[in-house]
Image (tube, grey):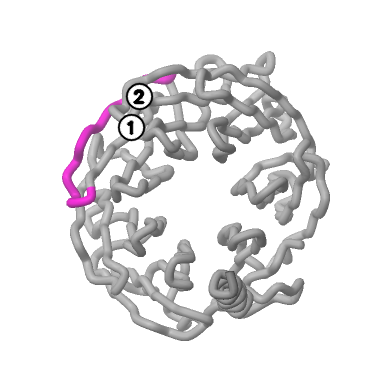
Amino acid sequence: MREIISIFIFFMLVFSNFFPLSSEDAVLYSLEEDHILKDIAFDPHINSIYLAGNIKDSNNSFVIKSNNGQFLREQILEDFKIQNILNDNFSNTYLLGLSKDGDKYLIKLTSSLSKRWEVKIKFSDMDAFSSFTVNDNQEVTVVGYSTYKRESDSFIVKIDRNGSIISSKILDIGPYERPYQIIEDYEGNFYIAGESKDKNFDMFVCKLTKDLELIWVDYFDNDNWEDGGLCLELINEDVIAVGYSGNEGWYVFDTVFFIYSPEGNASTFTRKNFSEGSDWVKQFKRNGNYYYAILWDILTGKEYALKLDYYFDILKKEEIKKDEIPLKIINIVDDTYFVFLKENTVYSKYLE
C-alpha cells in the first residue's frame, strides 16, 4: 500500500509541475519568431507536449517535442505543411497536411520524431481534411470531404499501423455534406458529426462499423433553420453530439446537445445559448461530471472558455483575450486546462 501511495504522489507531482494547479497562466513553450504554430498535442504517458506548425517564408514545417517548457528535439519536414497533430497511446505522432504540390498526406513519427511512414490520401483534386482518430492498434482513421461544383461528399479512410490503407469509402449523406469530427468507440465503431444540405443545412450524426459500413444516420432539421454538428464526445457507451442551430440568414445560433445510445436513439436533447449572440463550439471535452468548451460568438468575434455542469448549464464563463489564440482543451487526470498562444508563446490556464 505504501508503494502505491508513493507512486500516486509522484504521479501528481509530475503533472502539477507540468500544468501548475493555478488560475495563473503557465508558460509551456516559447517558439522562435519564424515558427507559425498550427496545432498541439499532449502525451501523458511521457509527460511531453508536441507543437506542430509551419516555418515562415518556406514550404517546410516543424514538430517540436518539449517537457516542462524545455526543448527536447525537433523534426523539420521539407515541402510539407502541417494541419493537425495527434498522439497515440504508444507515444507515436501523426500529422495531417499538404505537400508542396497540394497533395494530402498522413505522416507517422516515432516518439523520437523519426519518420516511420507517409501515405497519400486522394479522392479528388478538391479534398479537405476535417478530423482524424487513432486507436490502440495504431490504426488511424481520417475523415474529410471532396467538393464537386455545388456538391460535397464526405470521405473516410482507415490506415493500418504500417501505413497501408485498409479501407476507404465515400459517404453519401446528402447532396452537400461537410463532416467536422470523427471518434471511435471501444468496439471499433465510428461516429461522425457534420452538416448536410438539401434545401437548408441540417445537422447529421452517423455511426459506422469498423469496416466503414453505415449503421445509422440521424438528422436534425429545425424548420428551415441552419443546423450543423460540430463536436463529439464519448460517455461510456453513449455519444454526445454538439452542434449549432439558428435562423437562416440571421446568423444567430444556439448550441444544441444530443446524447445518442449505440442504437442511434437520441435519449436527450438540450438547447442553450451561451454567448447571447451566435454560438459556435470550437471544441468540447468531458472530464468527470463536467464539460468544457471553447466557444466562438460569430456576431461579436469574442471567444470564451466554458465550464458546464451535467445539464450543460454554465458554471464558469471566461472571455478569452483578443491577443490569445485558443489551441486546445486538455484533460490531465481530474484537472482540465485551456491552452492558448500569445505572442508566439504557448500558455496553459487551469479551468477551476
Please state the extent of the stretch shown in magenta in the rendering. 161-174
Q: Is residue 335 above or below residue 215?
A: below
Determine the residue positioned at 22% across, 66% down.
115
Report the disc number at residue 155. Answer: 1
In the picture, the quarter occupied by the C terminus is: bottom right
The number of numbered badges drawn on the structure is: 2
| Quadrant housing residue 171 | top left
Determine the residue positioned at 60% across, 48% down.
283
Type of amino acid at the residue the image marks with label 1 = Phe
Determine the residue positioned at 27% across, 64% down.
109
Determine if the magenta segment contains residue 167.
yes
- CA neighbours of label 1 inside 10 A, class few (<14), some (14 to 19), many (20+): many
* 73 to the left or right of 29: left
In the image, farthest residue toward the bottom: 70
Determine if the magenta segment contains residue 164.
yes
Type of amino acid at the residue the image marks with label 2 = Leu
Cβ atoms under marks 1 and 2 closer than 8 Å = yes
Q: Earlier in the sequence, mark 1 or mark 2?
A: 1
According to the picture, the residue beneath numbered tag 2 turns out to be 171
Where in the figure is residue 154, as x and y percent of width and height? 37, 30
